[in-house]
Amino acid sequence: MPPIRVLLLLTLAFHGGPALAAGKVSFVAGQVEFAGLEITDLNVDWTPIPDAPGAIVFSAARIRGIEATGPLTAFALDCPGLRIEGDELSCERGRLSGSLGTLGVQDTRFKAKRLADGSLQLGFESFAIAGGRGRLDVLLHGSKWTLGAKLAGLDIGRLAVVAKPWLELPQDLTVAGKASGNFRATGSGELLKTTKLDVSLEALDFSDTAGALAGERVAGTVELEATAVDPGFATNGRLALTGGQAYSDPVFLDFAAHGAEIRFSGTLDTDAARLTAADFSLDHSGVLQASGSATLDFRGETLLPDARVRIASLDVANALPAYVQPFLIDTGFKDIAGSGTLRGELDIGGGLPTRAALDFDAVAIDSPTAAVSLAGLRGRLNWFDDTSRTALAGQIDDSLFESRLAWESGRLWGLELGPADLPFATTGRHFRLLEPAILPIFDGGLAIETLRVRHAGTDEMYVRFDARILPISVAQLSRAFGWPEFQGTLAGSIPGLQLRQGVVTLDGNLEATVFDGQVVVRGLSLSDPLGKFPRMRATIGINDLDLALVTQTFSFGMITGRLSGWIADLETFGWMPEAFDASLFTPLDDRSKHRISQRAVTNLSSIGGGSGGAVAAALQGGFLKFFDNFGYKRLGLSCQLANDVCVMGGVEKTAGGYYIVKGAGLPRIDVIGSQTRVAWTTLVRQLGSIAESEIVVK
Amino acid sequence: MFRLITALLATFVLGLAACVTINVYFPAAAAEKAADRIIEDIWGPDKAGKPAGDEQSSTERTAGEIMVAALQDTLDFVVPAAHAEADIDVSSPAIRALTASMKARNADLEPFFSSGAIGLTSDGLIEIRDANAVPLADRNRLRTLVSADNSDRGSLYREIATANGHPEWEADIRSTFAERWIANARAGWYYKSKAGAWTQK
């Protein structure tokens, strides 16, 4: 306690004056050593007046030896009304001045009284400390002391310097701001016995050099009571933060928007710099109401090594941006938002969560980037870390390891999800669906047989997924993906889908029934599936599609007949094709009726490099205008895409080009392509304009 | 005399380095040009004045450097086949998509480059240099931007190598870019040396 050592000087003035009875006594010394202090140019003038207050002036040019404050200079104690009554000594209207080391320049009135029992009472009217000022009262009795202060306008930056011998802040942390409040402490010698403080903080700024921990204009109050026990202090306190902002990488809290109040009681071990709060309550306004027990380690690697937290209410809408989003910033879920309430319990051990039991109530979450949303989420999540799970096995009811979450609706990559109810178990970074479940998608869905995730969120993440596709209407899928509205249903199976080392593969082929034919996806591999630019490789086989169903509602124009082919070595980046070798054609053995409408002829001819307009004109002129559609023998198109160029071909070569449509019957129409190399972007534009065009061919 | 010997030694050493750099397998010069094109596309032309990229032309060369340059020219003449035929193709859809994504992000990143909050690293990425230069409320937004840009940067180097049929060039492409980002950086921006020290350009 620096004031204590400073006050020793006062004691010296009262105890140590030469005991003479009359006249003015001066004591002058160039150098005095007293009680560990080294005093230079000491001057004591004492003027005793019988039956009246005497006067004493004590001054020194420099006093060294007070570790806490550093040297004092131009020190002066002036006591014009020194009264001696029996064994009592008192000083009225005294004045203390000088530069008191880190306590700064002082110039204050004081009162002092030494009682018969040897105790000393001191009162300073306007003691200056750390840029602030206020009343300071001290009572010394033997080695025991009591200190009381009511201070205002303290500069927190300077206070940190004053407090350095007792409370050292991390070296790279700078603090600034204003504080005022009341402080009371008792002690004996160097030991602090009790303390009580009630401080209000204004515009507190702090930051470390890395910018990982910072606060700006933080306002609030701190109330703290501590009593010495062995070891440390029994303590209780309250911290209320009402304004400003704080950032502790990566969490950002705006106390102006959501104030926070923490109350705690527990034990503070000053040697270990640990606060063990047997009870705490946290009210982060509008975000989280929680209570429990916790240990704070101010010097260790993690600030919160252990805790048992009861979450009375967690507002999902406000908690996600504050507590969750920052940790997902590198993932597709960085913009996750939501609503609803969570309740439950969370245990932390060794600085990491060990158990969570959370009840979801009318929770909704939505992540636009990951293209996932779920609404009406309810149920219970029981999660354990691997160690707790192993330790508790056989000791608690197995049902406590199980979770069940249900939702009313959702969306995934544009697909509309219906209500589902999933029983599952999750431990550490692992997840396992406990029984087969149905995930409704539009009018169909996925019958999920297996869903297992291991090491989620790490490089070793592994996913296994087996499901059957329950027939889904292609029209709805088309709308979801922004495709032209195809007809028909999609059904099939997804066998042994696995994610391993960031790549999705299938054990077998992905088979789907669509347009009354089959589509088989072979050799599928999808890298970075949840990233911004997924890369897909696959070969797609197409067998016996009904062209009438494909073209029915498509503005391309009506074609009947069957279509087979392949899209081999397909490679997409961010779902845009980069390379493939595609060929689609009328199967050789197709015996179905082959008709093609005027409009389809026009559109196909524009793809092959002809002029759609000229063809349309030709078809509408002369006698051809009397025919709505024409017979054909075979049709087909091929495109080998590489380096942005599509090398095109048809069903058969002919002089100067290739047949896209080889006519049959009368009138016979052949569509012959002439361009063999077409820029991919041009082709996409042409197909796009065909899909959107509204040309009416009569 | 000592200066001359030093210059000659430096010339010899750098000459050897030049021999290694002008690699018959990796078209370093073409890669630099390709990198400059992409960088200009993302960052836009340097409106502040000096032509982007050629730092040395604006500074006086010392005698030693001129000799090195002369020797390099000679080497270029002696081994023209080294990079006469090889070229770097940067026109794949993947590269275009990545470039467009980074270009769109640039308007958000540029103020942070200018304020010194972020800088360029020696491995072709960007890094937060001084979080304290960023208001508290923006720090996480900056982290998002940096993480997204680094993800695109990594993909860009990989895709350029893949698009040219040489996945093994990825590291070379990355180090070429690392150097060209710094060369094209605006005055006042920060970059980090291999040793980890930040320097303001």
Image: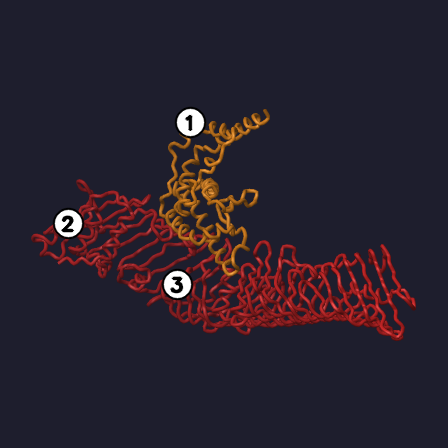
Chain colours: A red, B orange
Quadrant position of the C terminus of chain A in the picture: bottom left
State the residue position of label 2.
A614
Q: How far apart are marks 1 and 2 (CA)?
A: 56 Å
Residue found 63% across the figure and 63% down from its top: A305
Q: Distance between the residues labelled 3 and 2?
A: 45 Å
State the residue position of label 3.
A412
Quadrant position of the N terminus of chain A in the picture: bottom right
Tell me: A497 left or right of A692: right
What amino acid type should be assigned to the residue bearing mark 2?
A: Ala
Q: Are marks 3 and 2 in contact (CB under 8 Å)?
A: no
Q: Can residue A660 be seen at all in this image of the molecule?
A: yes
Compared with A550, B45 (above or below) is above
Pick whichever, A166 or A626, lies toward us: A166
Circle 2: element type: helix
User: Which one is earlier in the sequence, the residue at label 3 or at label 2?
Assistant: 3
What amino acid type should be assigned to the residue bearing mark 1?
A: Phe
Q: Which disc number belongs to residue B77?
A: 1
Q: Which disc number belongs to residue B152?
A: none
Circle 1: element type: helix
Give the chain of mark 2.
A
